[in-house]
Image (cartoon, rainbow, N blue to C red):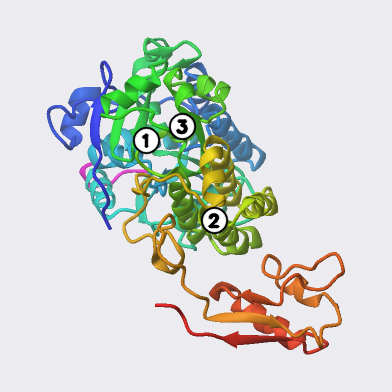
Amino acid sequence: MTGPVPSLAAVGTPRLLAGLDRQAWLDRTAHLALHGPAPTPDAGELAELAEEIRLRGRGGAGFPFARKVRAVTDALRRAGGGPAAVVVNGTEGEPGCLKDTALLLHVPHLVLDGALLAAGALGAEQVAIGVTREDVERSVRRAAAERGTFEPEVRVVRLPERFVTGEGTALVRGVGGGPALPSGRKVRSSESGLGGVPTLVSNTETFAQLAVAARLGAARFGELGLPEEPGTVLLTVAGRHVVETPTGLSLPYALELCGTEPGQGVLVGGYHGSWLSARDARSATVSRDALAAAGAAFGAGALLPLPESTCPVGETARVARWLAAETAGQCGPCFQGLPALAESLFDAAHGGGRQALEGVRARIRAVERRGACGHPDGTSRFVTSSLAAFAEDFEAHALGSGCGRPVLGVLPLPDGARTGPGGTAAGARSPRPAPRERLLVDWTLCRGHGLCADLLPGLLRLGPDGYPERAAMAVPARMRPRALRAVRRCPALALRIETTSSAN
């Protein structure tokens, strides 16, 4: 599968995107003519270089690269030697981010240089590059083939195009031939990663930056950017434009280069990120520290401005619906909590009252810090930030008056993504489909055992008296097996499922 092809731009002299003004794909010959041969540092020199240029992972978490290198070397030393591995995360399941795609589509040799440089320093026997797009896979395979047969082995692995595929343990499992799903275990890849050996895992841009820095050296690398954050960064703006810029650039200028402006606010860091108000965005700079001081995180460098013409409540609801559908399905907070959160947002967006907004906040509290991976926390952070940034709009929608703006769908989602109940847009005003099944409580039989609430958390709640709060509840398809189990196990035989016709 292919996706959107990013438009490319640079502020000043490009480093990662150098040469693309002359040709769209840099083959091996053009790459070497532009950058020259790559050096071969040892592990100590590699870690020292990464530390001097303050290189952090560019995939979202921003973990110091030098610490990753040293964690792998420490694990190898404790094991008395042995093989290691390097894994490049090129999956980019974030719909608002295209920077890694741009690198792998246009300058794959720069990424291969960085990965092989790290592999040589660590004595790694294999390099695995995880991707999800067909066009990206072709580009990287073509670049690897240009280098001929060499050690270590370079493998390009096509993985499912899902949001959670890029989670560290999911990536390592996927390129190793297993399911591309988070493991849920607190095992560091630096200790036991690909094939059970110590593994260095980092993002596509991180390895490309490493290849540039190894050639330039720390001093020349730091000639661009801020002293505390030297070098350049790649930004994806509005889900379409990729811009290379030195750190410290005015954020509004970066938006202006792409023909846009802060609008109602700017979502920084993608769908696990946070909103900057329009006022804060206009005074922000492209810097991890500056964005953190404003209450946002740089993440993977995605900047998503929200135009004045679209409804922020509907945009939030449709993204939350998609994020819920991207669950790995391995733990309750993801499998049950995120769909319930999306449903609560839909209720709030369509006049559910202040109690509906409280229901959204309750759902957030129910999933925070309980997931097997970071997806529930990231999703709840996005929704919490939306509630704060667009508080007046959420209040107006919950009370029934709305904001008067249509949902334009400006926050990018994959083609065909389900963004609302029954397949409708989450911000649309069309009638909501009636549920096909309802769980009914027969009050003449119910004795308040409470077993049903234990079996159906999030669907059936007990009141202060210990009895169910409602007599009829819609049964989502995902919860039907649990509902049937509750019916079978009710000691008083007070539950039944009723099938109803669906609205057209």
Which residue sits at x=33%, y=48%?
Answer: 408
Lower sequence index among marks 3 and 2: 3
Q: Which mark is residue 137?
A: none
What is the spatial separation of the Cα atoms under label 1 and label 3, in whole angstroms? 50 Å
Q: Amino acid at mark 2?
A: Gly
Q: Is residue 87 visible?
A: no
Residue carrying label 3: 121
- Find numbered disc 3 in the image and state the secondary structure of the residue it sits on: helix
Using the image as rendered, state which of residue 264 and residue 17 is in the foreground.
264
Q: Which mark is residue 351?
A: 2
Q: Quadrant of residue 67?
A: top right
Residue carrying label 1: 308
**Going by the image, does 455 lie left or right of 504?**
right
- Find numbered disc 1 in the image and state the secondary structure of the residue it sits on: loop
Label 2: how many Cα within 10 Å (few below 14, some 14–19, many 20+): some
Using the image as rendered, state which of residue 255 and residue 33 is in the foreground.
255
Specify the quadrant that holds the N terminus: bottom left
What is the spatial separation of the Cα atoms under label 3 and label 2, in whole angstroms? 59 Å
Specify start and end residues of the magenta stretch as a single range: 145-151
Q: Amino acid at mark 1?
A: Glu
Pointers 1 and 3 in contact (C-beta within 8 Å): no
Q: Is residue 83 above or below residue 292?
A: below
Task: Point out the residue furthest to the left here.
Answer: 22
The main secondary structure of the magenta stretch is loop
